[in-house]
Image: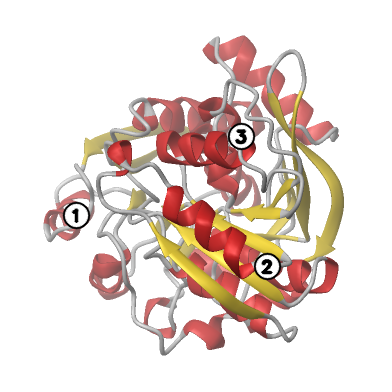
Amino acid sequence: MDIKIGILLPRSDMFPTLALDFLNALKLSFNKINTTEVVPKFLVEGVGTASDDSIVRLGEKMILQENADLVVSFCSHYKLADLAGVFKAYQKPLIHVNIGGNAIKQEHVHPNVVYHSLNLWQSCYAAGMHAAKKYGTKAAMAASYYDGGYQHSQAFIQGYTSQGGKIVNYYVSPMDYKSESFETMVAGIRESNPDVVFTLFSFKEGAKVMNILGSSDLSDKVPFVAIPLQTDETANTEDYGIKNLISIASWSFDEDSEYMNAFISEIKESLKKAPNIMALLGYEVGQVIAEVINTHGTIPTALADGLKNVQIPTPRGVMHYNAYNESQTDLLKVRQFTFNDVGYHNTVVDTIEASFMEDLYAKLEDIPYSGWQNPYICT
């Protein structure tokens, strides 16, 4: 039996190999796990930034012209209700893929649609709670013009204030971060004398900020809690000298677990490169599709119902889909950012039980989306 799987992939300046990393990893895991006679035909379309009406038209094209049995798509949260509505109307299954900077809302919850994410905003909420309990209730926050607009920043604040914390200093970098000295940021942190500093930067700007913080007198005086993208191993290749920086995430490539080790080995052997988060997302989506076909012999129209109560062992840990039809793992990882002679690592030093995550959606339900239109953090 043949099955048609439509895959709508965006492009990115920050992730120049995004589409290929995702697609190759998806095929790799699907071929490994699929135990049926089903032979998938992948119908791949580029969707640019996936942030305008063309993403909805392409989704509908996959249904009407290509007769796809399943569509996998990135999509801006600003267009997500429209895209999900198309698949609800036609009673066709959709897997929406996202890093997780914004929360799913009630309007997005349909039996035909599941949301596969890295749970970024939920882990930021957990990081806020963790920081208040571990470091103290007086915090400074420094955010990128690009990365600060998504709801992970609000989640940081809500998690922190839920434990009695208070933000005493804010800094937002200018759009032209390349010419910014960040002296104002350092001075503001120093003057406010916080117990902890939250940093929301990524990639090249994140590396620049950490280099500045690591060479300042703040490095060994105050702990830093970053969004996981700021400590991405592929973007950090030199020792910044920063002494005490953690992040909380649903994944760690440095975690010594059976499934993470197998994932890394397979990616390196098959794709001849170290894994990144796009490969991780693709690999897990391939697992999910194979699991569904192995279980049902086909892809159920009501995909969310077909995945209810299904526990899938992934590189991040045991994963299931919650009441909002979004993927989540049983544990979040507290990761210490450390440098050795080889490079930076996100070493797991603690874990946080993640069942509380389903209760967080209501906290952000009435907060409108802000930030960029892109379906992933920082293009």
Q: Which mark is residue 215?
A: 3
Quadrant into which the N terminus falls: top left
Percent across and percent down for residue 84 are 31, 69
Q: Is residue 307 something that shows in the picture?
A: no
Asked which secondary structure carries label 1, the reply is: helix
- Which quadrant of the figure has residue 189? bottom right
Cα distance between the residues tagged 1 and 3: 44 Å
Neighbour class for label 1 at 10 Å: few (<14), some, many (≥20)? many
> Could you say where residue 15 lies in the image, as x and y percent from the top left?
37, 32
Which amino acid does the dot numbered 2 rest on?
Pro
Q: Quadrant of residue 325?
A: bottom right
Q: Which residue appears at 65% of the width and 52% of the height?
A: 295
Query: Mark 1: which amino acid?
Result: Ile
Q: Amino acid at mark 3?
A: Ser
The kind of secondary structure element at disc 2 is loop
Specify whether 85 is left or right of 156: left
On the image, numbered disc 1 is attached to which residue?
55
Crowd band around label 2 with a 10 angstrom C-alpha radius: few (<14), some (14–19), many (20+)? many
Residue 45 shown left or right of residue 70 in the figure: left
Q: Which numbered disc covers residue 194?
A: 2
Q: Nearer the viewer, mark 1 or mark 2?
A: 2
In terms of secondary structure, where does tag 3 sit? loop
Would residue 42 be visible to someone looking at this image? yes
Judged left or right of residue 236, residue 95 is left
Q: Return the x and y of residue 182 as percentages of the image width and height.
A: 42, 47
Instruction: State whether residue 377 is above or below residue 306.
Output: above
User: At x 65% / y 33%, what residue is drawn?
Assistant: 33
Q: Tell me if mark 3 has few (under 14), some (14-19) or many (20+) residues whose alpha carbon lies within 10 angstroms of its own.
A: few
User: Picture quarter containing residue 57?
Assistant: bottom left
